[in-house]
Amino acid sequence: MAIVSDLPDVGVMIWLQIVWFKESGVRFLYLVFLAVWAVSSAAVEVKDLYVSEVEVASQSPEDRNGAIRLALADILVKVTGRRDIRSEAAIQELIKSGPRYVRQYSYREDGVASGESPQRKLLVRFDSFALNEALNAAGIEVWSEERPSILAWVAVDGGAKRYLLESENHPRLTAFFQKAAEKRGLPLLLPLMDLVDQSAISFNDIWGNFDDRIAQASTRYGADTILSGRLLKKSGSRWQVEWTLYQQGDVAHWRDEAKSASEALALGIDGTFDLLAERYVIGAAQKEIEQYELRVSGIKGLDDFVWLTNRIKALSLIETVEWRELSGESAQLSLTIKGDKQALRRALDSVERLFLITSDAEDQEGELFYQIRP
């Protein structure tokens, strides 16, 4: 059964249901058609996509630059949606020159307060504009900061104990789960498991994969993607795990084996990452090229001009930017994009200091009107 939202009915659409099974390292793909109620998506703007923290042996330039390259490799996976991106020759060269893309870095020591042996960490913030330009020059698509929100219901059968994963009673495991999602640039939400959740859903509902119950319990969270997991501890340290991902009418299933509950959770995040990237990165790459006119007011001088140009060019869906007119504090630009007008508005709305001032009538004429504010 498909996930059905209780949002107002907007019609019936035919969606392609993708079902993945992974057995003995081989994935089998089954395609079926599924009629579901069309619902709107609630994407989230992910912050700090171009920030990574890695371990570093010392503060020497050699160790620091090596750690920066490792951090950049992680960033490139996040922003391209490809876990195999490091195999490309252009990316290998980009990683080698990683230090030139650094905007800021800092050190910290982890584990000091707990009395454990401290681990030195390097926090690196990269220049998103420069990296996006390098990726575009290499012909590699960039996954924008706007990503689908994910609500995860996870049932764990550890043998001696069965439970639904939530942060209050399982802080270390949920912290690892969140960290794995953060590493992939995915906005992950775990249920509160308060009285409302406890009355709406049970361990058996998740374990039995009763998708109607899962859909009903998920409504309060407003996430547009739902991840359901079932972790079963087998003999020794072996775990068997099954995942189901519901997203805009598509349902994907996959199975894995892991050596720990933490590894099982990481496999769930990686599988989700791969499936969503296929939709949002590869799907975006196949969209037609469109051209739109943009008018921007509030340009006070050269700094605003340069800032606006750089910010628009850095948006992942932008193909070309052409300045047509600059008069006083206003400018007209012609934008060629890979996507539609709605996608362009979402992208422009994500730019700090840029505010939409288009009326409905003006918007219908084809131009978008924005204003730069302090």
Image (tube, rainbow, N blue to C red):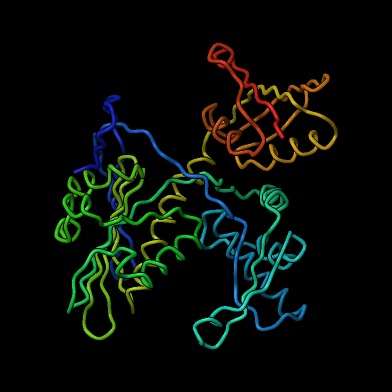
Place of residue 75 in the rendered image (x, y in percent of width and height, measured from the top left): 59, 60
Residue 227 located left or right of residue 347: left
Residue 259 located left or right of residue 69: left
Q: Residue at x 21, y 53 (%)?
A: 195
From the viewer's perspective, is residue 117 above or below residue 228?
Answer: below
Residue 303, quarter of picture: top right
Q: Residue at x 29, y 43 (%)?
A: 220
Q: Residue at x 24, y 38 (%)?
A: 4
From the viewer's perspective, is residue 343 above or below residue 254?
Answer: above
Residue 163 located left or right of residue 18: left
Q: Residue at x 66, y 21 (%)?
A: 293
Residue 62, quarter of picture: bottom right
From the viewer's perspective, is residue 219 above or below residue 9?
Answer: below
Task: Give the quadrant of the N terminus.
Answer: top left
Place of residue 225 in the rendered image (x, y in percent of width and height, measured from the top left): 35, 47
Place of residue 159 in the rendered image (x, y in percent of width and height, measured from the top left): 18, 78
